[in-house]
Image: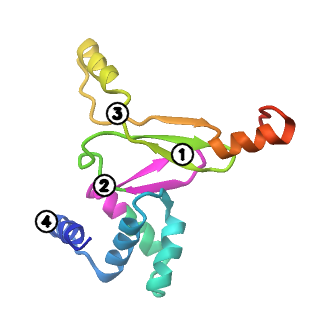
Amino acid sequence: MREIINQVEEKLRAGDSKLTPRREHILRVLLENKDKHLSAEEIYHLVKQRAPDVGLATVYRTLELFCDFDIIHSIDFGDGRKRYEFGGAQEKGHHHHHLICTRCGKITEVNEDLLEELELRVTKLYDFTIVDHELKFFGYCRDCTAKMKGEEGGLAVP
């Protein structure tokens, strides 16, 4: 973790910014929760446990700064709240996609680039340089599907 923090510190310094202690707390929360898609409010509550003087506005400003420096990126899963993932678009090496349960809100990552062939076709056909893409599937997770089957003896759409 220290190595990543040092890399982020260098990246910020190269852009005339600093990794202040408050920003480092926010970065640590993001790193410790890499497998989750936390909202700014969730990050704020986790940061408050270790640094009670950090305000919500500081969290928002820091998340925007980290996005600007391609340290993290934000995703909207259709519920009106941005969620954040560690790692910028250029650092991931490949894209991943998301399965979003519309019943319980669970988000599952699909760690394969399902659109690579389509990107190549679009690039060739339209002479279009693709720099990023995002794919989200909305439906019901395994647990919610099982619950719905149990509730009415069949799949009931809420």
Residue 108 lies within the magenta run: no
| Of the image marks 3 and 1, the number of the one nearer the N terminus | 1
Q: From the viewer's perspective, is 9 left or right of 60?
A: left
Residue 30 visible here? yes
Q: CA distance from mark 3 to mark 2?
A: 16 Å
Q: Residue sitting at 43 percent across and 71 percent down?
A: 59
82 or 35, which lies in front? 35
Q: From the viewer's perspective, is 154 left or right of 52?
A: right
Quadrant in which the N terminus appears: bottom left
Q: CA distance from mark 3 to mark 1?
A: 18 Å
| Of the image marks 3 and 2, the number of the one nearer the N terminus | 2
Q: Residue sitting at 41 percent across and 71 percent down?
A: 29
Residue that carries the numbered disc 3 in the rendered image: 113
Contact? badges 1 and 4 (CB < 8 Å): no
Residue that carries the numbered disc 4 in the rendered image: 14
Q: CA distance from mark 2 to mark 1?
A: 18 Å
In front: mark 2 or mark 4?
2
